[in-house]
């Protein structure tokens, strides 16, 4: 892999992870500047040549969501006009992913709209991490790789915790596939929380399918927004006799003072540990004794190396992670 053949950039919401990936690959992070006009217009300028190079650009479209997305689209356009050979857009957290279908009449499918924006801006490939719904892959008309940071967090979790009675719990029906894959890899039982959402950011939980009594439960999900789902599920698990409750979630949005609420749950003994990734740059602000932030930098570095060598992602990236988990059974 020749360092001169590719270049890595990090936009405003992914400067740290981009720098960490560059350090892992022993390359210099590309320089770019993002500025705003007085009326809020965004300008992105790349301060070094990209002509004929494979460009990897990191940006999470997290808060401020619309500014982050616009910054990404403008940067893709700039790279295209600067004659980059390929534009590989790495989005650790893909905003608008929850709007992936019409649940009622006259609603948009914004996840598809954003996919169209990225394609027509000029991206040649998109790399997503633990997307909210698998069908989002089909929204893109360009190649997409969907990485699974869950394995990274699971590896960190098992390094520090040894449970004889571990039970993997899905906080809703939508996350059953994700939870089942982890349960199967660890030969652990699976439980499912019966959740209903009467309105956005409102949660009702009423039942648990599966035996959680005297079990060390691990709630697994792709994202935490306000935390309502996880806190309600944790409370119900406690009522059903769970020995301990841990949470593992890739994208930590922590909106509406969610972090303060989670810290209270930890203090009250309702939650033992929370494992999150650094897919959202602000995640490092939440690190504490019981909130563990797992770095995705090595994972992304290996991905870039494997892609540059035209090797199989599933065999050479996931295979290693699954082998690690199997060794810890």
Image (cartoon, helix red, strand yellow):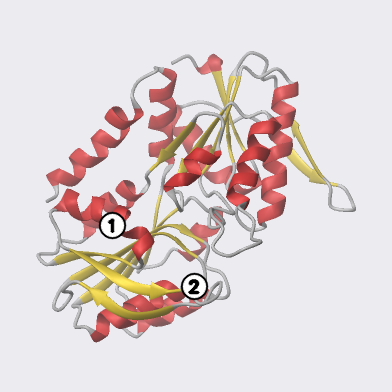
Q: Position of residue 246 (x, y in %)?
A: 29, 68
Instruction: Give the side of residue 75 with respect to residue 157, left or right.
Output: right
Q: Which residue is mark 2?
A: 259
Density class for disc 1 (Cα within 10 Å; few <14, some 14-19, many ≥20) is many
Q: Image point 89% across, 53% down: which residue?
A: 39
Density class for disc 2 (Cα within 10 Å; few <14, some 14-19, many ≥20) is some
Residue 183 lies in what quarter of the image?
bottom left
Q: Position of residue 150 (x, y in %)?
A: 34, 50
Q: Earlier in the sequence, mark 1 or mark 2?
A: 1
Q: How many marks?
A: 2
Secondary structure state at the residue bearing disc 2 = helix
Q: CA distance from mark 1 to mark 2?
A: 23 Å
Q: Image point 42% across, 23% down: which residue?
A: 307
- Look at the image and tell me whether residue 270 can be seen: no
Q: Image point 26% across, 76% down: which residue?
A: 208
Question: From the viewer's perspective, is residue 28 above or below residue 254?
Answer: above
The numbered mark at residue 179 is 1
Instruction: Give the side of residue 123 with respect to residue 224, left or right.
Output: right
Residue 171 lies in what quarter of the image?
bottom left
Q: Position of residue 23 (x, y in %)?
A: 47, 33
Instruction: Give the side of residue 28 with respect to residue 26, left or right.
Output: right
């Amino acid at each position: 892999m020749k360092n001169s053949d590719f270049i890595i950039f990090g936009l405003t919401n992914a400067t740290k992870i981009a720098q960490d990936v560059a350090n892992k690959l022993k390359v210099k992070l590309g320089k770019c500047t993002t500025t705003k006009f007085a009326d809020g217009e965004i300008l992105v300028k790349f301060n070094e040549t990209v002509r004929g190079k494979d460009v990897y650009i990191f940006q999470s479209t997290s808060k401020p969501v619309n500014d982050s997305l616009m910054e990404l689209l403008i940067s893709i356009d700039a790279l295209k006009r600067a004659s980059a050979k390929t534009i590989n857009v790495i989005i650790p957290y893909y905003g608008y992913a929850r709007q992936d279908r019409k649940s009622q009449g006259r609603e948009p499918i914004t996840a598809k709209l954003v996919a169209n924006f990225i394609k027509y801006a000029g991206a040649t490939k998109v790399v997503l991490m633990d997307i909210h719904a698998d069908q989002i892959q089909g929204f893109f008309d360009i190649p997409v790789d969907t990485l699974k940071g869950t394995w990274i967090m699971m590896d960190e979790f098992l390094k520090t915790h040894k449970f004889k009675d571990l039970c993997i719990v899905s906080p809703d029906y939508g996350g059953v596939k994700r939870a089942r894959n982890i349960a199967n890899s660890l030969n652990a039982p699976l439980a499912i929380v019966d959740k209903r959402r009467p309105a956005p950011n409102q949660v009702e939980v009423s039942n648990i399918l599966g035996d959680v009594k005297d079990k060390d439960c691990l709630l697994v999900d792709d994202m935490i927004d306000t935390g309502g789902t996880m806190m309600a599920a944790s409370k119900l698990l406690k009522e059903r006799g769970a020995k301990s409750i841990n949470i593992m979630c890739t994208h930590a949005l922590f909106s509406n003072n969610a972090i303060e609420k989670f810290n209270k749950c930890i203090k009250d003994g309702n939650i033992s540990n929370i494992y999150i990734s650094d897919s959202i740059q602000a995640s490092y602000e939440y690190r504490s004794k019981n909130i563990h932030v797992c770095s995705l930098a090595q994972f992304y570095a290996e991905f870039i190396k494997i892609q540059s060598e035209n090797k199989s992602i599933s065999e050479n990236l996931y295979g290693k992670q699954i082998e690690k988990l199997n060794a810890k059974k």
